[in-house]
Image (tube, grey):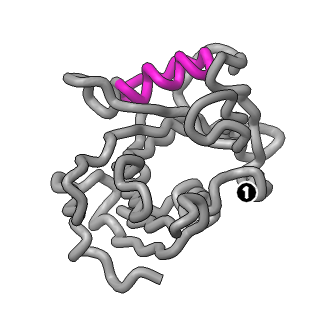
Amino acid sequence: MEHASTQTPTRVVLCLPVEHGANGTQVLLGLKQRGFGAGRVVAPGGKIEPGESPEAAAVRELVEETSLVADIDSLLPAARVYFRFPANPAADMDCTIYLTSAFTGMAMPSAELAPEWHRVENLPLERMWDDSALWLGRILSGERFDALVRLAADNESVDGFSTVNWPGNGIPAADATEADFPDIT
């Protein structure tokens, strides 16, 4: 993602376990316990370590934060979301989001996250970052895209959002650039 700042956005991943059962389709989110986003409901995830693939980071972060172990080969790329904080460019993030239905274990709390299963049709959006309402339901319904989220000066509310759909279900080889996105609304 091209960006006006000289800062390089932090590369992060999110890994969303999804289960289909008698109670409908549910996704695992969790109450963030500390650090960036503490007190909000978020998806399991975090920074990609040097030399680590996004897929390996997604599996590692999921087990560290929830005790669930995902099969790396089961990860389905769902979106790439480019978060831009014009008032604080050091907070910029390039996030790859994966879904998985192939995991083992029982979700357990960690120092980072208190996991919670939520029905897909009843997501806790009022307890999440404002931008979550713009992309989370869409990826859970099967859409695949790159998104640009521009945060307002308060570094919390959304000042602009735009998407570019993927040409198929696979993640595009090249990252999107700001020029790829239609006008941000």
Q: Is residue 23 above or below residue 5?
A: above
| Residue drawn at the location 20% of the way across and 23% of the way down | 51
> Is most of the magenta stretch helix, strand or loop?
helix
Viewer-nearest residue: 113 or 98: 113
Q: Could you classify mark 1 by the number of other residues whose Cα lies within 10 Å: few (under 14), some (14-19), or many (20 or more)?
A: some
Viewer-nearest residue: 87 or 31: 87
Viewer-nearest residue: 41 or 143: 41
Residue 131 falls left or right of residue 123: left
| Residue drawn at the location 71% of the way across and 46% of the way down | 25
Residue 103 falls left or right of residue 110: left
Residue 113 falls in image quadrant = top right
* Pointer 1 residue: 125
Local secondary structure at mark 1: helix
Question: Residue 104: percent from the left, percent from the top?
Answer: 59, 17
Residue 27 falls left or right of residue 46: right
Question: Residue 73: percent from the left, percent from the top?
Answer: 36, 28
Per the image, is 62 magenta? Answer: yes
Identified by mark 1, the residue type is: Leu
Residue 23 falls in image quadrant = top right
- Residue lying furthest right in this view? 23
Residue 81 in sight in this render: no
Question: Residue 75: percent from the left, percent from the top?
Answer: 41, 35
| Residue drawn at the location 76% of the way across and 43% of the way down | 118
| Residue drawn at the location 36% of the way across and 48% of the way down | 90
Viewer-nearest residue: 75 or 90: 90
Question: Residue 157: percent from the left, percent from the top?
Answer: 60, 66
Query: Residues in magenta?
Result: 57-74
Q: Is residue 131 above or below residue 163?
A: above
